[in-house]
Image: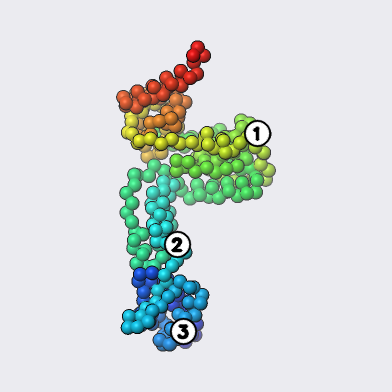
Amino acid sequence: MHENLQLQRLRIVYIYKILCEKTNASHGITLNEIIGLLADSGISAERKAVYADIEALKLLDSNITGSRGKYADYRLTEREFELAELKLLTDAVNSSRILSAEQSERLLTKIRALTDENSSKELRRQLRIPRRKVSFGSEVFSAIDTIYQAVSEQKQIQFKYFSYDMSKKKIYRDTERVCSPFELVWNDELYYLVAYYPNREKVANFRVDHMENVRLTDSECDPLPKGFDMESYLSSTFSMFGGEDTTVRLKFHSSLAGPVLDRFGRDISLIPDDEEHFHINVTVKPQGTFFGWLAQFGGKAEILTPSVRKAYAEHLRQILAVNNDEA
């Protein structure tokens, strides 16, 4: 009896929930249908009482409308998010490399709850995307939260930093890093920390998914170097160029397994050529950014695809011509 009385007191809340879940601008619900759904939840109600509750809800939410006549119904015409906006959010979650399948589904369930049941069906979209190269675990999101906290409180952080070897095993640096965090950068679907690194007395970048056991220290952050321009630094360090995607075969010295896995993800196949070399097949944009990344490895990296090899050689010739002392 007491439970039923409590439900009666919550009747208006249940009615609003029904309008949110069952209606939209093009689909309404009748008074009788509302009464039936209330009964399914153990709430008995007369038409007059339900009508009065809906009129009260109209004062709370001007987006609740009702009609008169034989086919009279009630509906919630507008919501915080339009369906098109929810579709964009759904596609963004589906295409994100940093979310595991479980994390994606949790977010998608929450997004679907922002609209009615009929519209929710439209959000169960199958977006065709390439296989994810990276899927971060919960520890990465925890690290991101800690970094944001450190930036807000202007505290230094300490963490373990690692790379990968040919067997895709983690290789930890000899000592833990301590740095002053300034910015988190989202670039090419990866998080990077921009921080002042006192061991090298300069600003450095750290990939967040290569940082473990990130924690705050009691030390205050070091100031940025005098005259340092963060906007210019971010623009030059993380600039990306357009271009057509091209599948290429690349050959590397075995010592470069870590940087290759960093660049292309741990799902990439490292195919041995001999005891000291391996090759990979990847899709890239064969322009400035990619060529610049490759050039840092000198003779330890080689392009085997003829057309891209030719473009890379021309790229290097242009650099040489500009920087030739005899020019």
- x and y percentages locating residue 272 in the rendered image: 34, 28
Q: Mark 2 touching mark 3, by CB under 8 A?
A: no
Q: Is residue 314 above or below residue 181?
A: above
Say which amino acid is labelled 1.
Answer: Gly
Residue ID for mark 3: 52
Residue at 65% of width from left, 45% of height from top? 155
Q: Earlier in the sequence, mark 2 or mark 1?
A: 2
- x and y percentages locating residue 208 in the rendered image: 51, 42
Q: Secondary structure at mark 3?
A: helix
Label 3 Cα neighbours within 10 Å, binned few <14 / some 14-19 / many ≥20: few
Residue 39 occupies quadrant: bottom left
41 or 129, nearer to the observer: 129
Q: Secondary structure at mark 1?
A: loop
Residue 30 occupies quadrant: bottom left
11 or 320, nearer to the observer: 320
Most extreme residue toward the top is 326
Q: CA distance from mark 2 to mark 3?
A: 28 Å
194 or 214, nearer to the observer: 194
Residue at 45% of width from left, 71% of height from top? 63
Residue at 34% of width from left, 67% of height from top? 118
Is residue 9 among what the camera can see? yes
Label 2 Cα neighbours within 10 Å, binned few <14 / some 14-19 / many ≥20: few
- x and y percentages locating residue 324 in the rendered image: 49, 15
Q: How is the image coloured?
A: rainbow
Q: Is residue 290 above or below residue 29?
A: above
Residue ID for mark 1: 227
Q: Secondary structure at mark 2?
A: loop
- x and y percentages locating residue 52 in the rendered image: 46, 84
Residue ID for mark 2: 81
Q: Is residue 302 above or below residue 20?
A: above
Q: Mark 2 touching mark 1, by CB under 8 A?
A: no
